Image (spheres, rainbow, N blue to C red):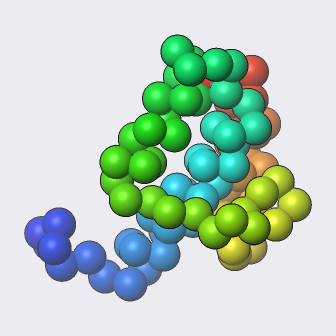
């Protein structure tokens, strides 16, 4: 499969991961030179544009929230 032939499941998984990473890094980054801030920049360059309503208590899917909770448990103090 080439990068232009993404199936729907792959696109949904990426969407959920990007949303979870966006919320995690937005809430837990430790400044402009931090790892979390760099990840936010990469999400932006990848073309990810989150809903203005996206946040810790407002996710776009249940899977996105599940991924976010798992990421927080592991990475909240490492960004």
Residue 74 drawn above or below residue 63:
above
Split into 4 quadrants, where in the image is the C terminus?
A: top right
**Is residue 63 shown to the viewer in this render?**
no
Picture quadrant of residue 78: top right
Q: Would you say 41 lies left or right of 60 here? A: left
Instruction: Please tell me which residue is depicted at 69% across the width and 75% down the height of the picture.
Output: 61
Residue closest to the eye, 19 or 8 = 19
* 49, above or below 46, in the image: below
Q: Position of residue 72 (x, y in %)?
A: 75, 39
Report x, y in % for residue 57: 87, 60
Q: Is residue 40 above or below residue 75?
A: below
Is 59 on the left or on the right of 8, as rendered?
Answer: right
- The structure residue drawn at horizontal position 82% and vertical position 54%, both measured from the top left corner, is 56
At 73% across and 31% down in the image, what residue appears?
Answer: 28
* Observer-nearest of 17 and 60: 60
Quadrant location of residue 27?
top right
Q: Position of residue 53 (x, y in %)?
A: 75, 67
Q: Position of residue 19 (x, y in %)?
A: 60, 59
């Amino acid at each position: 499969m080439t990068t232009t032939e993404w199936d729907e499941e792959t696109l949904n998984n990426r969407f959920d991961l990007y949303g979870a990473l966006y919320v995690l890094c937005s809430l837990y980054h430790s400044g402009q030179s931090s790892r979390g801030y760099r990840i936010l920049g990469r999400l932006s360059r990848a073309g990810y544009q989150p809903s203005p309503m996206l946040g810790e208590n407002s996710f776009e899917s249940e899977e996105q929230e599940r991924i976010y909770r798992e990421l927080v448990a592991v990475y909240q103090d490492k960004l």
